[in-house]
Image: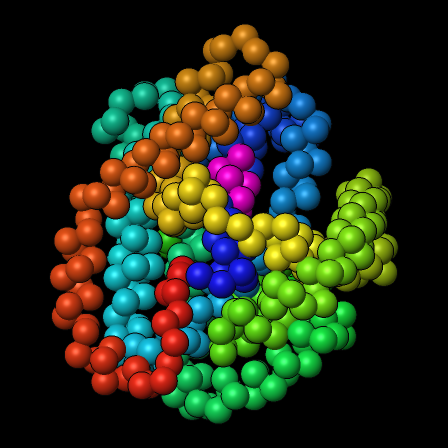
Amino acid sequence: MGKTSLAFANLRALTILLVVSFHSVLAYLGSQPATQPPFDAPPFIWRAFPILDHERWFGFDLYCAALYVFLMPLFFFISGLFVWPSLARKGIKAFIAGRAFRIGLPFVLGTAFLMPAAHYPVYRLTAADPSLSAYWAHWTALPLWPNGPLWFLWQLFVLNLAAAALFWLAPGFGAAASRVQAKAAEFPGRYLAGFGAVSILAYLPLASIFKPWDWSQFGPFSMQSAQVLLFVSYFFAGVAVGANGVERGLLDADGALPRRWRFWLGLAAAAFFAWLGVTAATVELKPPPVALERLAAVLFAISSVSACAALIAVFLRFGAKAVPLTDNLARNAYGIYLVHYFFVIWLQYLMLGVSLYAAAKGILVSAAVLLLSWGVAIAAGHVLPSSRTSFARRNAPAQAAARPSNEAAVPDKL
């Protein structure tokens, strides 16, 4: 495994830790309502903040704001990195079948079964009748079907279908992306400045209509309203960067990006605090000036790009090392993502009556959720390998026919 692949394996381990901790501390944000909102009352705020504890700490607000800026854009970028090599190796039909099995099926099963089980404590907090039958009646009467963090899966599946269509309609995209990446290796600042402009154009139209924290939902399909096009831009940026392998171009572990990690880290910090200050002003002013809201949107996009660049640069510079524990965490990151929200809600609920400071509760819930989810992911990996092997065998002929004879093996990551 090359340096860049090692760095990204460690980065995947970090991102799943951040996701788990982000959801685990949402119950203790100082900015949330003082009391639990009713289960049946719009706008159903519990979809984003399922449990509200009476213990609060403003430090968690800053922590979650920092993660909110870059975490999901980074997820979409990383998810796009291995798409083009996977299409070249497997062919379109096998690629889509694999993604349907790996992404589509978990979304359907998780939304149908895991999310109702996860949200039962939310209902109990304000329910007159806490029975399971009453809960199911209230759940099915909702005008939507909450799916927690599984919203990421359906959007990712749609973007994978779009990438497959691009592969079919414009097979020369990979070669064109390779030429751009050759220059990006030497001048990452120019490349990232260009992508920053693209991300601003992608974010600004919807940000002028929705707040950064607004959600839209149609049945089981939820989305962060203002960031839909922003996520699209990050995913296809990942597709372009990884079109001819991640060990070269912008992500070269010996290239200019990791050498200038201090610059990107400083820019990320400056952009984040600038966005935070302007956003705070827009919340305080009633109504806020339009120009101030647009400035907040621009700063959000800049903060996202610079934070992602800084984190990648730091890991390329210092994280290109094999570490058994983080390697295991990275290999189980997807399984942890699928199941962790169940443990988040139930543990936050069980901690409501515990007399501890918010910081202590947040740390304990985060650690417990990680260990439980990690254990489930490892156990599932031992139970389900036969299903994955059978699926791979069924698709082996199509993959072999589509694989170029001179193509190097490329890891197929989510």
- Name the residue at 44% across, 61% down: 1
The x and y percentages for residue 382 are 21, 43
- Name the residue at 63% across, 39% down: 64
Specify the quadrant of the image occupied by residue 226: bottom right
- Name the residue at 48% across, 33% down: 50
Give yes or no for residue 16 being in the magenta stretch.
Answer: yes
Seen from the viewer's position, the closer of residues 125 and 165 is 165
Q: Is residue 101 visible?
A: yes
Q: How many marks?
A: 0
Give yes or no for residue 338 being in the magenta stretch.
Answer: no
The x and y percentages for residue 414 are 40, 60
Q: Is residue 188 left or right of residue 13?
A: right
Q: Is residue 165 left or right of residue 201?
A: left
User: Magenta part of the protein: which range?
Assistant: 14-21
The x and y percentages for residue 111 are 32, 48
Q: Is residue 236 above or below residue 304?
A: below
| Residue that lies at the very extreme toward the top in this rendered image | 355
